[in-house]
Image (tube, rainbow, N blue to C red):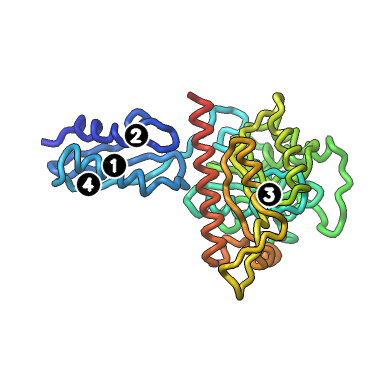
């Protein structure tokens, strides 16, 4: 007879590679059912975007086959329950990810949009806020120019903003409420209040991840968001050249101030190199090489990868169909991998901060 204890003892030999504890200790094994030589159970991962999913499943199979019996008919369901930090301010939103850079024009909005869509592609419930209040670009990147969110009434009798849904994620931008041809001459307090409304007065529903595209610089919006809401971590976007890196370090300095203290999830190096279509094996480092990687090493945080300078990526934003949806093998792989790594780092941060 196969017993529950035998199965659990075998699974104690399978360690989550990120959290450095075994699956049983982490309470990741659920719905264990044994009927003769048929064994089924669920492995509850910390995110649907877990890059180690297949490896963990194979490790479970090997442990049971070697330590219990080779004749077991095994059915493993790989599921997920996204982790979060205990907080009451936005209880329906498990994790808020800010995408930041010290310098404008480094592709922060491109990374934000494709990161959000990558997380959704892996099965997460995702929202995206365009917090670049003076130069919102998300309406253009999603083909939503001229769209206006609807006002809905909550069960409590209050009016809330209904985010616009497209490509499987929920979207809000200050650009939905303004004339795209007119500048927005708002002073700091007015801008901060407007941004708070996108968080507090919106009907986001249940979200695993809310991605926030921050404006460049180190101004009022950054301070308002990071001090007003529970931020799970920041993705840093830079290009390789020294001018961008210098400004990026200032942006990171703001996030690391004692009064803000946002965990850094890693660095993305955008426009890392150029590869001509006719010479696919060649890489030309137009703006310098490895600047983002060196910055990540100096900060002792993960380097989340290089995004090449591709015409298709810039065109996708103009067309209103982000690059990850364009069915191009390279860009899809790059942004899916980015989503997996960011989700992985959030799970590690959450486990570290609650342990």
Label 4 sits on a secondary structure element that is strand
Which residue position is annotated with label 2?
A: 23
Q: Earlier in the sequence, mark 2 or mark 1?
A: 2
Q: Residue at x 65, y 56 (%)?
A: 272
Q: Residue at x 63, y 39 (%)?
A: 234
| Residue 151 makes an appearance in the image | no
> How many numbered marks appear?
4
Which residue position is annotated with label 1?
A: 60
Find out whether the residues at labels 1 and 4 contact each other: C-beta distance under 8 Å: no
Q: Earlier in the sequence, mark 2 or mark 4?
A: 2
Q: Which mark is residue 172?
A: 3
Bin the neighbour count of mark 4 within 10 Å (Cα to Cα): few under 14, some 14-19, many 20 and up.
some
Which residue position is annotated with label 4?
A: 74
Q: Residue at x 50, y 48 (%)?
A: 340
Q: CA distance from mark 1 to mark 4?
A: 10 Å
Q: Quadrant of residue 107?
A: bottom right
């Amino acid at each position: 007879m196969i017993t529950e204890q035998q199965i659990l003892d075998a699974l104690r030999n399978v360690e989550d590679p990120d959290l450095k504890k075994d699956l049983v200790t982490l309470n990741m094994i659920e719905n264990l059912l044994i009927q003769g030589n048929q064994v089924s159970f669920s492995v509850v991962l910390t995110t649907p975007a877990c890059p180690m999913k297949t490896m963990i499943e194979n490790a479970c199979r090997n442990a049971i086959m070697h330590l219990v019996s080779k004749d077991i008919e095994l059915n493993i369901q790989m599921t997920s329950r996204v982790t979060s930090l205990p907080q009451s301010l936005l209880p329906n939103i498990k994790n808020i990810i800010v995408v930041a850079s010290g310098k404008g024009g480094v592709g922060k909005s491109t990374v934000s949009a494709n990161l959000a869509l990558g997380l959704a592609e892996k099965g997460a419930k995702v929202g995206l806020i365009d917090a670049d209040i003076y130069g919102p670009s998300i309406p253009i990147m999603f083909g939503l120019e001229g769209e206006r969110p609807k006002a809905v009434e909550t069960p409590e009798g209050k009016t809330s903003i209904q985010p616009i849904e497209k490509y499987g994620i929920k979207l809000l931008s200050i650009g939905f409420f303004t004339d795209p041809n007119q500048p927005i001459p708002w002073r700091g307090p007015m801008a901060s209040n407007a941004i708070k409304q996108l968080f507090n007065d919106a009907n986001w529903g249940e979200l695993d991840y809310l991605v926030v595209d921050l404006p460049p610089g180190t101004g009022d919006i950054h301070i308002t968001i990071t001090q007003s809401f529970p931020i799970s971590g920041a993705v840093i976007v830079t290009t390789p050249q020294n001018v961008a890196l210098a400004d990026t370090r200032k942006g990171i300095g703001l996030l690391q101030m004692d009064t803000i203290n946002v965990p850094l999830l890693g660095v993305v190096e955008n426009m890392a190199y150029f590869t001509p279509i006719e010479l696919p094996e060649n890489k030309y480092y137009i703006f310098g090489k490895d600047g983002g990687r060196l910055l990540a090493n100096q900060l002792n945080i993960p380097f989340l990868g290089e995004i090449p300078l591709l015409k298709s990526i810039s065109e996708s934003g103009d067309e209103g169909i982000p690059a990850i949806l364009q069915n191009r093998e390279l860009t899809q792989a790059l942004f899916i991998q980015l989503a997996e790594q960011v989700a992985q780092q959030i799970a590690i941060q959450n486990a570290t901060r609650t342990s």
